[in-house]
Amino acid sequence: MKNVYRPIDAEILEVIDETPTIKTFVVEPKEDIGFATGQFMEVTVPGLGEAPFTPSSSPNVKEKIDFTIMSVGKVTEELHRMTKGQMVGVRGPMGKGYPLDAWKGKEILIVGGGVGAAPLRSLFLALVERLDDFKKILYCYGARTPGDIVYKEQILDKWQKINPKKIEIRTTVDEGDSTWKGNVGVVTTVVKDLGIDINNSVGVVCGPPIMMKFGTFALVEQGYPDSAIHLSMEKNMSCGIGKCGHCMLGEYMVCQDGPVMTYDKVKDKPAIWD
Ligand SMILES: Cc1cc2nc3c(=O)[nH]c(=O)nc-3n(C[C@H](O)[C@H](O)[C@H](O)COP(=O)(O)OP(=O)(O)OC[C@H]3O[C@@H](n4cnc5c(N)ncnc54)[C@H](O)[C@@H]3O)c2cc1C
Ligand code: FES
């Protein structure tokens, strides 16, 4: 039987600087560890501790996994000091991801900000790899400044070119600079005039708490039913497998019932945007 507490050794193959505070770690697990897009894993820094992260790579790439990680504290600061060739542990996958099969034939609106780009890149790549199943992808992403845009080249240049008829990318920054020619304003300023049939659409929101809150409200304002809005809930997690209770949200354990949960399930729970 699989020991869910045992981290699998994984070698850091590459470290990519995304922004001054965010790096992508490409790791090679030494055993098979598949995942569905939106599921999360616990990444261990040996001798220090573990923290939950959502893979940012496609779930269809099996031999290596990308984690895009913002440095905020004990584990993440140490991860940011690690380099190619060093080993981490990876435990998982855990929880429920995005229900892609249920979205067949639909138009997908993705709204993200900051390091929320991590699970959203995994989702975007998974959608693109079966693009015939979906009618349209509209990806709206906001960052604080142009220097804070995660996956800058992909978002600003590459992704829309994959299929300009079915994919639209909208990017915005809170504060522009002399190089920035795009929209200036928070991400909700580009969540309008969607050109989407809301009745045949699902929304996805992921980002910092304040962005999640107003991004969700923007979708509600556009007419999305609460049950069509998919949120990535970031509760304080420990065991990741429904045993410790750290991640309780009303009757739910976010590590098992989430982290992807629809807004109708969580909207009346306390402190969902904290
Ligand atoms: C399901 C899930 C998926 C996640 N996926 C990702 C991901 O893909 N990429 C990623 O970078 N992070 C992700 N996170 C957040 C990540 O787990 C935390 O940033 C991490 O646990 C912090 O650990 P630490 O030891 O570095 O910080 P700690 O030492 O535990 O915390 C230090 C300080 O940072 C604050 N802090 C903790 N988390 C955050 C945060 N997210 N933002 C701002 N301040 C914070 C704390 O309040 C504390 O004050 C995810 C969280 C969950 C629950
Ligand atoms: S993290 Fe332990 S029960 Fe969810």
Image (spheres, rainbow, N blue to C red):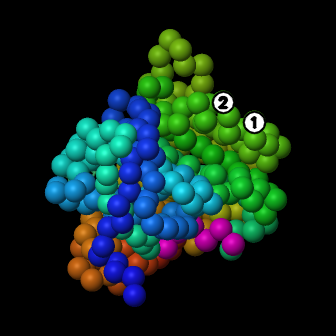
**Is 150 located above or below residue 253 in the figure?**
above
| Some atom of ligand 1 lies within 8 Å of the CB belonging to the residue at label 1 | no
Magenta-drawn stretch, dominant element (helix, strand or loop): loop
Question: SS of the residue at dot 2?
Answer: helix
Packing grade of label 2 (10 A; few <14, some 14-19, many >=20) is few
Disc sitting over residue 157 in the figure:
2
Span colored in magenta: 96-101
Q: Quadrant of residue 192?
A: top right
Residue 101 in sight in this render: yes
Q: Is residue 226 left or right of residue 158?
A: left
Residue 252 picture location, percent across and down: 37, 80
Residue that lies at the very extreme toward the bottom in this rendered image: 1
Q: Is residue 114 above or below residue 222?
A: above
Q: Amino acid at mark 2?
A: Asp
Query: Relative to the observer, which residue lies in front, 195 or 110?
Result: 110
Cβ–Cβ under 8 Å for marks 2 and 1: yes
Q: Nearer the viewer, residue 20 or 106?
A: 20
Q: Which residue is mark 1?
A: 161
Foreground residue among 164 and 196: 164
* Disc 1 residue type (three-letter): Lys
Q: Is residue 194 left or right of residue 67?
A: right
Residue at 61% x, 35% y is 154
How far apart marks 2 and 1 lie (CA) works out to 7 Å
